[in-house]
C-alpha cells in the first residue's frame, strides 16, 4: 500500500511542476508507459521512486531503466575494385558493443569487434573473373537490428589469361598502360623478373620487379611499349619460368 501511495504522489508532483520528458526505455517484468498532452512517463512496479526537480520541470525515474540502444552503418551498399588488396571503408555509429563479419573469404574486415563509433576497412583479394561478385558484411549487437552491407567487387576488365600449369596469371589482356601478375605458387621465393620479347623473338627489355611477397600482385608498366603483340617470360628466383602472350593496345 505504501508503494502504491508513493507512485500516486509522484504522479501528482508531475502535474504540479509541468511537462515531463523521459528519454529512457524501461526493462521490467511489470510496469508500463503512458502519456498525455503534458506528461510522458515510463514506470516499473515494486521499486522505490527517485525524482528530481529542476527549473520547473520534473524528471521521474523509477526502477531499472537504460538508455536507447543504437547501431547504424554509413552505407548499405559498397563497391570495391578488382585488383588484389583493393579496399573500401564504412563507418559504424553505435553506443553498444558490436561484431562484424563477412560471408565470403575473399573479403576481410580489419576489425571484427568493437564498442561505440568506428571506421572499418574492407580488403578484397583479386577477382579473377570478368564478372562482378558480391559479399555481405553484417554488423550485429545485442537487442538491436543487425545492419547489413552488400559489397560488390568489379570484375577484371578483360579477365585473366591463365597459364597452362597455373604457375602465373596476368590481367588485363589486352592491356594499355599496365599489366598485373599473380603468382599461384605459394612456395615461390626470390625476385620477380620479366623479360619482354617482340613477336619475332627479340628481347625488348628486362624488368626486375623486386622480391616476391606471397599473395600479392605485381605490376609491370607498359608505357614504353608500342601497340602490338609481345611475349613475356616471367620467373621467380630464376626458376618457375613461363611465357605469357600479351597484347598491348
Image (cartoon, rainbow, N blue to C red):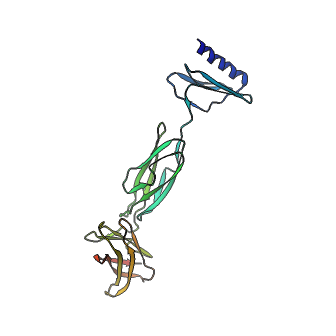
The C terminus lies in quadrant: bottom left
Is residue 92 left or right of 53 when viewed as pictured? Answer: left
x%, y% of residue 93? 54, 46
x%, y% of residue 224? 44, 83
Near-viewer residue (104 or 155): 104
- Residue 147 vs 81, above or below: the answer is above
State the residue at coordinates (49%, 23%): 29
Is residue 96 left or right of 133 when viewed as pictured? Answer: right
The N terminus lies in quadrant: top right
Q: Residue furthest top?
A: 1
The part of the image, by quadrant, that contains residue 8 is top right
Is residue 111 left or right of 32 when viewed as pictured? Answer: left
x%, y% of residue 72? 52, 45
- Residue 196 vs 168, above or below: the answer is below
State the residue at coordinates (51%, 41%): 96
x%, y% of residue 2? 60, 13
- Residue 77 vs 40, above or below: the answer is below
The part of the image, by quadrant, that contains residue 171 is bottom left
Amino acid at each position: 500500500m505504501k508503494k502504491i501511495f508513493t507512485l500516486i504522489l509522484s504522479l501528482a508532483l508531475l502535474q504540479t511542476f509541468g511537462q515531463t520528458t523521459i528519454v529512457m526505455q524501461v526493462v521490467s517484468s511489470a510496469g508500463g508507459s503512458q502519456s498525455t498532452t503534458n506528461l510522458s512517463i515510463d514506470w516499473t512496479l515494486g521499486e522505490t521512486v527517485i525524482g528530481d526537480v529542476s527549473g520547473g520541470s520534473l524528471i521521474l525515474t523509477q526502477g531499472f531503466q537504460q538508455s536507447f540502444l543504437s547501431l547504424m552503418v554509413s552505407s548499405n551498399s559498397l563497391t570495391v575494385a578488382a585488383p588484389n588488396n583493393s579496399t573500401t571503408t564504412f563507418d559504424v555509429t553505435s553506443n553498444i558493443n558490436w561484431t562484424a563479419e563477412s560471408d565470403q573469404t575473399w573479403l576481410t574486415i580489419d576489425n571484427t569487434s568493437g564498442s561505440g563509433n568506428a571506421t572499418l576497412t574492407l580488403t578484397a583479394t583479386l577477382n579473377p573473373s570478368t564478372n562482378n561478385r558480391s559479399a555481405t558484411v553484417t554488423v550485429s549487437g545485442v537487442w538491436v537490428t543487425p545492419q547489413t552491407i552488400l559489397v560488390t567487387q568489379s570484375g577484371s576488365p578483360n579477365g585473366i589469361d591463365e597459364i597452362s600449369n597455373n604457375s602465373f596469371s596476368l590481367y588485363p589482356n589486352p592491356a594499355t598502360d599496365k599489366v598485373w601478375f599473380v603468382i599461384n605458387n605459394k612456395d615461390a621465393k626470390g625476385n620477380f623478373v620479366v623479360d619482354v620479347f617482340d613477336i619475332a623473338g627479340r628481347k625488348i627489355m628486362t624488368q626486375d620487379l623486386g622480391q616476391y611477397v606471397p599473395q600479392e600482385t605485381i605490376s609491370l608498366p607498359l608505357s614504353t611499349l608500342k601497340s602490338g603483340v609481345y611475349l613475356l617470360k616471367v620467373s621467380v628466383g630464376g626458376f618457375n619460368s613461363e611465357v605469357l602472350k600479351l597484347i598491348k593496345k
